[in-house]
Image (cartoon, rainbow, N blue to C red):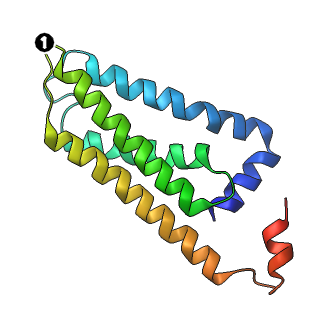
Amino acid sequence: MLTEIIHYLKRNVTIYAACSCFLPVWAAAILILSVVPPMPGGMNAGPAAHVCAYFILSLAAALRLHAGRARAAFLKGFLAAGSYGALIEIIQGVIPYRCFEASDVGINFGAALLAGAIGGAAARNVRKQGPASGDARRWRNRS
């Protein structure tokens, strides 16, 4: 499934370029929202914001890091997104109006893991099902 999406995006260069630009923009948005002074009940508060942000970041990283092996891309996306979340928490630890919270690191890794698990399972199912026509070589090598 991810392979099909990547092939489609590569054929449509404008869409692929937009998706390639999304990852650094999303990562920058997370960083900015993580270092500005907290807003009571605002967008950057609470576990739900962490789950949404790092779930999307993990999927975006997997799409960006994809190089032929979908399951490996989701693993790399999980590790990249979770590590980025841990790094941001460390940065928050040195900002006077923010603080390091181990629970946020866990939530960030959990959301990234969820995205990686869903993506990896989808990639595994697509691989198990194989091509509808039974011609695996043609299915695997199409561009």
- Quadrant of residue 117 in the image? bottom left
Above or below for 88 versus 124: above
Q: What x and y, as percent, mark residue 96?
A: 13, 12
- The residue indicated by pointer 1 is 96
Q: What x and y, as percent, mark residue 103?
A: 15, 43
Q: Quadrant of the C terminus?
A: bottom right
Residue sitting at the far bottom: 134
Look at label 1 and name its amino acid: Pro
Q: What x and y, as percent, mark residue 73?
A: 56, 54
Give the side of residue 111 with respect to residue 138, left or right: left
In this view, the residue in front, 80 or 56, is 80
Could you tell me if residue 43 is visible in this image?
A: no
Question: Which SS class for mark 1?
Answer: loop
Q: Residue at x 47, y 31 (%)?
A: 26
Count of marks placed on residues: 1
Q: Quadrant of the N terminus?
A: bottom right
Above or below for 62 versus 69: above
In this view, the residue in front, 39 or 59, is 59
Give the side of residue 55 with respect to residue 72, left or right: left
- Crowd band around label 1 with a 10 angstrom C-alpha radius: few (<14), some (14–19), many (20+): few
- Quadrant of residue 49 in the image? top left
Q: Residue at x 81, y 73 (%)?
A: 139
Could you tell me if residue 114 is visible in this image?
A: yes
